[in-house]
Image (spheres, helix red, strand yellow):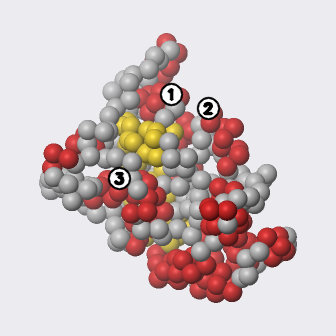
């Protein structure tokens, strides 16, 4: 058996300084066209370390709650896998990925470059009702780049001030966005996109031995208020996610908000957990919960630690399977 590879998250540091720390997202290649709430750009270095430990090398990465898709795109552009399976239930986000896999990425790039971005023009464009997937995709990108926080859920509105008072233009970088879509065209044939329920996709690929999963579910019950503000589809059966993970023949990595109910479910299903530092969109330092079958490879980093054991009620204890 091949021994685990040496951890190299920060190869410029000496061995005694190796650590996982809040990532400067500007240092990570920006592959996704979305400016997405809850995006995982900050998690890319940790994902790289995880997938480098996989032996034999996985052929497929499944991302059942894809959203902006940065993990799947990283896996493809950096050739960690041959194919990704991306699932997303939100119709507007799905339209963008559908357009990419249907060879309309260059068309979207052209539309972005030629669009005269004013509030009036955006309102006119997004008010059109269309059956065209690529037109829906363009409307979604416009909203994502001009709405507050990139939020597409009902009730979201235009940026008022934005970066340096630029308003709706503060997140509109047409050349950069166009380049990202042109780049996506190179890997489009390696994306198997599903406009579908992520749980169904998990079940479909759970028996595939050479498939790995990156699972970043919506908010749990404790965060539903924030979830409904950020996402159209924030209701998911989290217990089913954990039950499905027990059936996965390959491997998986889950990221969650650090909630007590999640920690209880993870322990009940016998999975390992670690807390990893992150910085949220408001630049506040927090900790994200990482869950998997085996997270021993993370123990080399002093800033990563196991969460404290919380009280588990007698009812829950009864449900814990003996191992």
- What's the residue at 50%, 42% (across, down)? 284
Q: Classify 139 as above or below 22.
A: below
**Going by the image, does 70 lie left or right of 165?**
left
Q: Which of the pair 272/287 is nearer the observer?
A: 287
Q: Which of the pair 312/21 is nearer the observer?
A: 21
Q: Which mark is residue 18?
A: none
Q: Which mark is residue 260?
A: 1
Q: Which of the pair 84/135 is nearer the observer?
A: 135
**Going by the image, does 105 lie left or right of 279?**
right
Could you tell me if the residues under marks 3 and 1 are in contact, i.e. CB atoms within 8 Å? no
* Distance from the alpha carbon under mark 2 to that under mark 3: 26 Å
Q: Which of the pair 83/48 is nearer the observer?
A: 48
Badge 3 is on which residue?
Answer: 46
- What's the residue at 20%, 54% (across, down)? 13
- What's the residue at 32%, 53% (across, down)? 50
Residue 268 appears in the rendering: yes
Quarter holding residue 285 = top left
Q: Secondary structure at mark 2?
A: helix
* Distance from the alpha carbon under mark 1 to that under mark 2: 9 Å
Q: How many marks?
A: 3
Circle 2 crowding by C-alpha within 10 Å: few under 14, some 14–19, many from 20:
few
Q: Quadrant of the C terminus?
A: top left
Residue 15 in the image, given as x and y percentages of width and height: 15, 49
Badge 2 is on which residue?
Answer: 222
Q: Classify 36 as above or below 259.
A: below
Q: Secondary structure at mark 1?
A: helix
Could you tell me if the residues under marks 1 and 2 are in contact, i.e. CB atoms within 8 Å? yes
Q: Which is more N-terminal, label 2 or label 1?
A: 2
Residue 42 in the image, given as x and y percentages of width and height: 43, 54
Residue 303 in the image, given as x and y percentages of width and height: 31, 39
């Amino acid at each position: 058996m091949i021994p685990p590879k040496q951890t190299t998250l920060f190869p410029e540091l000496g061995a005694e300084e190796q650590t996982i720390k809040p990532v400067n997202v500007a240092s990570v290649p920006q592959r996704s066209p979305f400016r997405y709430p809850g995006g995982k750009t900050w998690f890319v270095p940790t994902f790289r370390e995880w997938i480098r430990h996989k032996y034999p090398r996985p052929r497929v990465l499944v991302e059942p709650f894809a959203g902006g898709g940065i993990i799947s795109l990283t896996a493809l552009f950096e050739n960690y896998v041959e194919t990704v399976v991306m699932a997303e239930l939100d119709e507007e986000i799905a339209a963008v990925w559908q357009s990419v896999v249907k060879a309309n990425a260059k068309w979207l790039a052209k539309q972005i470059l030629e669009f005269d971005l004013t509030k009036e023009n955006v309102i006119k464009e997004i008010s059109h009702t269309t059956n065209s997937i690529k037109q829906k995709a363009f409307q979604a990108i416009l909203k994502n780049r001009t709405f507050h926080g990139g939020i597409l859920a009902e009730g979201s509105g235009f940026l008022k001030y934005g970066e340096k008072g630029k308003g709706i233009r503060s997140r509109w970088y047409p050349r950069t966005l166009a380049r990202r879509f042109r780049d996506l065209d190179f890997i489009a044939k390696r994306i198997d996109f599903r406009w579908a329920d992520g749980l169904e996709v998990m079940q479909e690929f759970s028996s595939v031995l050479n498939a790995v999963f990156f699972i970043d579910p919506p908010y749990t019950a404790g965060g539903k208020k924030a979830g409904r503000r950020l996402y159209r589809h924030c209701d998911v059966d989290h217990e089913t996610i954990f039950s499905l993970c027990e059936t996965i023949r390959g491997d998986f990595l889950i990221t969650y908000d650090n909630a007590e109910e999640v920690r209880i479910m993870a322990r009940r299903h016998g999975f390992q957990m670690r807390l990893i530092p992150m910085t949220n969109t408001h630049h506040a330092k927090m900790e994200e919960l990482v869950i998997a079958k085996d997270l021993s490879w993370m123990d080399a980093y002093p800033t990563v630690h196991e969460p404290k054991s919380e009280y588990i009620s007698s009812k829950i204890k009864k449900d814990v399977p003996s191992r």
